[in-house]
Amino acid sequence: MLITLLILAASAVGFATGRLRSDVVALCALLLLLLTGILTPEEALAGFSNPIVIMMIGLFVVGGAIFRTGLAARIGGSLMRLAGNSQRRLFFLVVVGTALIGAFVSNTGTVALMLPIVVSMSARAGTDARRLLMPLAFASSMGGMLTLIGTPPNLVIQEHLTEGGYAPLSFFSFTPVGLICIAVGALALYPLSRRLVRHDAHDDARHKGGKSLSQLVSEYRLGEQMGHVTVTPSSSLCHQSLGSLDLRARYGVSVIEVRRQSRQGLLIRSVSQEAAGPATVVQGGDTLYLSGNDTDIRRFAADYGLTLGDDADGGLSFYDTGIAEILLMPTSRLVGRRVRESGLRAKYGINVLAVRRKGSYLRDDLADLRLLNGDVLLVHGAWTQIGRLNDDEDDFVLLGRPLDMADRVTLDYKAPIAALIMLAMIVLMVCDFIPVAPVTAVMLAAVAMVLTGCFRNVEAAYKTINWESVVLIGAMLPMSVALTKTGASALISHSLVSALGQFGPLALLAGIYLATSVLTFFVSNTATAVLMAPIAVSSATALDCSPYPFLFAVTLGASMCFASPFSTPPNALVMQAGAYRFADYLRVGLPLQLIIGAVMIAILPLLFPF
């Protein structure tokens, strides 16, 4: 028992100091339990096959698909537009809207989605973003209390209930608790958030990195030189190669991209993009994206009976293809050559859309433009081909991180199918009469997101999984086995019962809540829930009480952790964006944590009687 407690204490210190990643600390603790013979290899590795871990992996994929298809952005954007110019309405919409999204999506992903929306909305409303970003992080945690899948501690207490032979919680068993948390939290945060507004002149330097796709489109004013046409089945353009048409000589336009769409059913739609080349054969229904002036594009469309697009920005969007900047080196073989002689299309399958030269943007008659040292070329092509540009570092330097941009491209045409899959997953988890376990429903949804093309590829789906969290939970779950096996859990629970049990179950409930909250200050909320859940069950059993209120005290104490920037990933995510200091979390998060704790200790016995 002593060894187990020492390992637990050492783990707490490791989590608190942060010198090692949390997953490494958890693995070290697991190895120590193995080496000391406290756990067998089967017991130690059982955590990685636990349904909680598998479900979390699936939820990461489902949540990633919701982001990648732009579905979450549509929901968040709609909520933000309701705010208008009212700062009060903006504040409560941020809190409530974020909480609702956080009920179904991981709190980390929710904050990652909402953070840029909140920053832009606060600028439009004339509100200091610092007043909104910390409440944004807290609201994502409060929203996690609305549903079973909202936050990992909810899944942890569900596991302990089922293992103890108690009736499992349903998908919306958490909803009354979550609604109270959101109501109390929003009302308390509104006055508390005033403490976050600073009146100094300090502003963080903007993060330096590559330009976004929208910034490149705006900077090079691509909408002024681009348009698109749709090829009708009766057009004489059908079945002809672009090379044979010689459109540059005849019309002064160039085909940059060919896009084809196909549909399977009402919701599933596929879009393929191809950087145009001389060998590209035009088919009926194709959409051709053109570079040239508006008059020439209209003349080309009229001659071939094409349908002219009317998007103000040229209709350019990025799924399989993208744009990037490359800087010509002084020793580049391209210096002195015309664009048509550069070989970029032949070697990489990319087209040059514009050239930036000493502050000027050159877009007309690019084919005959002679390239100079220091020119920046805006190129367009398939993301995979753009990535290959790094191979020719002697000729040019690829600016920014275009492949990172490719990973962030939203497949918005897949949003309807992503919404349908998400709703189907929720129905399977909510309806008890459907014989599908929650972990099965989540894995079905994750695989469906991949198979229906809600990700650009399978690798993109794997990238959405936070493996640090997965390893942390898988490695820490056996700690509860060790605590129970060695009697440490019983000792701690008996100590709590001895100290507080004589004052009644309400005092014990408050003690468990407080102990969980304090531990979460130093240890991640998921690890805290894993450690405290068996203690809560043992304590309830010792007093002959229902374990439900005590387990809810654990998940609430673990989830409502606002007094530290390191308690949850959302707290840490907004720290840099809001230029917060550790003291800001104490000034705002600690009072909020105490207020919600006091309310929930009084409310839990009413919702879940002892």
Image (spheres, rainbow, N blue to C red):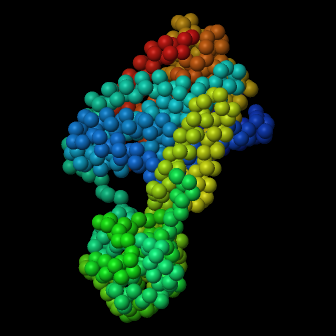
Q: Residue at x 46, y 76 (%)?
A: 234
From the top left corner, tell me how far across and down residue 61 is, in percent.
57, 49
Residue 451, image quadrant: bottom right
Quadrant location of the N terminus in the rendered image:
top right
Judged left or right of residue 175, residue 290 is: left
* Residue 325 showing in the rendered view: no
Looking at the picture, tell me which residue is in the foreground, 317 or 301: 301
Q: Name the residue at the front extreme.
A: 234
Judged left or right of residue 586, residue 415 is: right
* Residue 445 showing in the rendered view: yes
Q: Is residue 276 above or below residue 559?
A: below
Residue 580, image quadrant: top left
From the top left corner, tell me how far across and down residue 503 is, in percent.
53, 6
From the top left corner, tell me how far across and down residue 583 is, in percent.
35, 37
Judged left or right of residue 290, residue 25 is: right
Looking at the picture, tell me which residue is in the foreground, 536 or 71: 71
From the top left corner, tell me how far across and down residue 346 is, in percent.
51, 86
Looking at the picture, tell me which residue is in the foreground, 346 or 541: 346
How many numbered markers are drawn? 0
Q: Is residue 114 above or below residue 350?
A: above
Q: Residue at x 45, y 19 (%)?
A: 600
Q: Residue at x 73, y 25 (%)?
A: 486
Looking at the picture, tell me which residue is in the foreground, 394 or 465: 465
Quadrant location of the C terminus in the rendered image:
top right
Q: Residue at x 37, y 24 (%)?
A: 184
